[in-house]
Amino acid sequence: MSSSFKSSGQVSYELRGDVAVMTVSNAPVNALSLAIRQDLVACIKQFEEDDVAKAAVIVGAGKVFIAGADIREFKRPATEPHLPDVIDGIEACSKPVIAAIHGVALGGGLEVALGCHFRVGVKGAKVGLPEVHLGIIPGAGGTQRLPRLAGYEKALEMIPSGVPIGADAAKAAGILDDVSDEADAVAAGLVFARSVIDNGTPLRRCSELVAPAVDAQVFADAKAAVAKRARGQKSPVVCVEAIEVASQTSFADGMAKEREMFMELKNSAQHRALAHAFFADRALGKLPEIEGIAPRALKSIGVIGGGTMGAGIATGALMNGLAVTLIERDDEALGRAKATIAKNVGGAVKKGKLSAEQEQRIFAEALSLSTDYASLSEVDLVVEAVFEDIDVKKQVFEKLDEVCKEGAVLATNTSYLDVNAIAAVTKRPQDVIGLHFFSPAHIMKLLEVVVADKTAPDVIVTGFQLGKIMRKVAVRAGVCDGFIGNRILATYRAAADAIVVDGSTPFEVDEVMLEFGFPMGPYAVADLAGLDIGWATRKRKAPTRDPRERYFTFADRMCEQGWFGQKTSKGYYVYEEGARKGTPNPAVLDILTEERKEKQINAQNLSKEQILDRYMAAMVNEAAKVVEEGIALRPLDVDMTLIYGYGFPRWRGGPMQYADEIGLEKILSNIKAYAQEDAYFWQPAKLLEELVASGRTFADLNAESGNNSAAKK
Ligand code: CAA
Ligand code: NAI
């Protein structure tokens, strides 16, 4: 027997005295590819036959133990050896096998560890079964071994939530046998192996353990709670069901049932959507225009305007360690801004997101308030969040151009205005960019990084860097009215208004969208945002409105009565004092009846499916135009914008992924049918027509962009 054996490449086998060390090596996260599975089988066989080796240690090379199955392989038919069989082979081994974990052991990675007879972690290691986030359940024994090892309650806590736990918590739960002080996993594994060999510790196989029984009600309660949170996503509920199976049957039967459940979810639209979202998240910042370019320095920022957005942006920056200088028009406004920031920061402390010391440091050191623009002379980046008025914004940028240091990034938080026009008033348009935050800015995840014609690449990178520091999801957008998100929103809101005027009610539309998976329907959202905002915009745009556009008056009439939504306790819904959820306002239906009468519209009763089809067709069509014009670089950028900024259910993957699932041909033919009624609104996007003609999908476009790792083979 040679003391050093190398398998086909991805798992090495090396003897250290009488211990075999198997190192899983598949950068960057040691995903369990076919080659790894084959190698593990070969290494275990080698170990069984190796007379010198008394114990084996499995470790991961690089920064983690094993991050799970290779998600990219899920698109292809499963190939033997299947992971559950590989893990059964490890567990069946007649000599001790120890998993030595550093970094993370996730999904199939933890399942490999659960197949070992012992598990040791180094400090800082984390273990978890996050499959639920991919719309699947653990498919290699996780739902059957974990409850047997750590109990049903722990399994019900970890598997449906998918949240990993740290080494100490894992030891307390019995998942790890020890947390080692050794610096690396190999050393930790070797020490543990020595003690197992020397003490003759009997092998402990999870499949043979019996978890303390629990009342069946525990599963019923867990299912109800999980279903409520999941809002249409299947996998969390199936996770509970799979754990329940462990309490009802033998290990072998449980494994067979788990496999069945896993395979069904693996072939579902929800899994495809969530896997798409996983890779899209990682593709967002991969842009050819900034590849290899470093960000500018970013330690301190200025914020102009301390209203709704400015105070929120300042809060988010302060909570993430940046120094902030906030500028307002007068001391009174500064006082209001400071009070808002204090309330926001106080809220974060209460929720345990920030310590009292951090809170104290923010107000003692990190936040400066001023009415003097000269205080911005040393900041690295400024975000302007003053009124949405191009003249006011231009004045602000002229001042910034005078006072800011060379190389400072000058950003506007405008929702709709032309970033090129704002940049043009400065002598440094290359330093100007749009950074469009969403309200409440210290909480909402999305940040649109709006690239103007002359924005320099390192300014774009700095925009993404600010997003990273503030823990946002940054999406690159181009300049147009509303950028990616608000532009698409305006279109699907217009489609909703047409649906409503033509015969449905706002409450039906809201119900359909809630059932689809949005947290709120569009009319409930309008009440929350304030109906006066849209009213002001409509008045502003009235002179330039295209005469071919259908114009609806019901929302204006509501505003004329002083119904601005939640802030006036009345809008589409009526709100009891202090309540955030309202009941339908019946007077809205009278206003709609009036409008239909005036316009001689025969109310048509659309089914829920018809409402959904129109709403989604409008969203997808505008989204396709946004991609076609290069406002969004790829369909995936639209998907993530709608998911992180507009409540689109992640488990549907965003509008483009949804459209691919429905079929682009069907969407296009719907649009053409609707165009018979309103040819101006329902102009099909050229891109949609092209894709249908060439038999391609939005996913193909993502793949063609070369930056989406999901598409990599
Ligand atoms: N399969 C394939 N690729 C993966 C992967 C996986 N399981 N996990 C990560 N990657 C890829 C990422 O796509 C990324 O690729 P690109 O560089 O091409 O974009 C690269 O690995 C690095 O990933 P991150 O950027 O996420 O790196 P990070 O250091 O921020 O995070 C991590 C590392 C915590 C492991 C994170 O990648 C992660 O959470 N991965 C997914 C874990 C997971 O969901 N595991 C369950 C898989 S399903 C399963 O195991 C089913 C089963 O029961 C058999
Ligand atoms: P706001 O009215 O709440 O706050 C604006 C603040 O700017 C006020 O406190 C005002 O005193 C201050 N201000 C005005 N002129 C100033 C000047 N010259 N110098 C210093 N301060 C000045 O408005 P809000 O909602 O915060 O919006 C700000 C910007 O953010 C707008 O461009 C808006 O379109 C955009 N935005 C708003 C969102 C929202 O949901 N409210 C979401 C995303 C962007």
Image: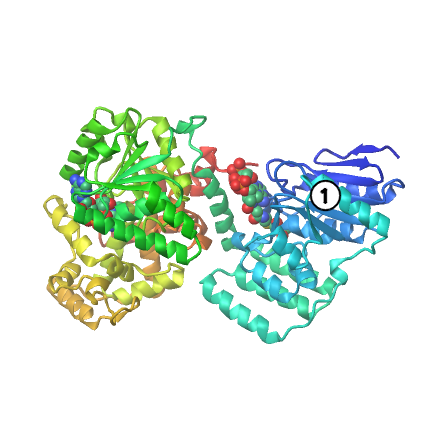
Most foreground residue, 619 or 36? 36
Q: In this view, does 154 lie to the left or right of 295?
A: right
Model colouring: rainbow
Decide if residue 214 is in sight here: yes
Q: Is residue 106 left or right of residue 341?
A: right
Most foreground residue, 712 or 463? 463
x, y (%) of residue 600?
13, 64
x, y (%) of residue 436?
30, 42
x, y (%) of residue 547?
12, 47
Q: Quadrant of the C terminus?
A: top right
Give the residue pinned by disc 1: 188
- Is disc 1 placed on a helix, strand or loop? helix
Q: Quadrant of the N terminus?
A: top right
Most foreground residue, 64 or 367? 367
Q: In which quarter of the image is residue 588?
A: bottom left
Residue drawn at x 69%, y 70% is 212
Decide if residue 697 is in sight here: no
x, y (%) of residue 364?
34, 44
Q: In which quarter of the image is residue 310?
A: top left
Say which amino acid is labelled 1: Ala
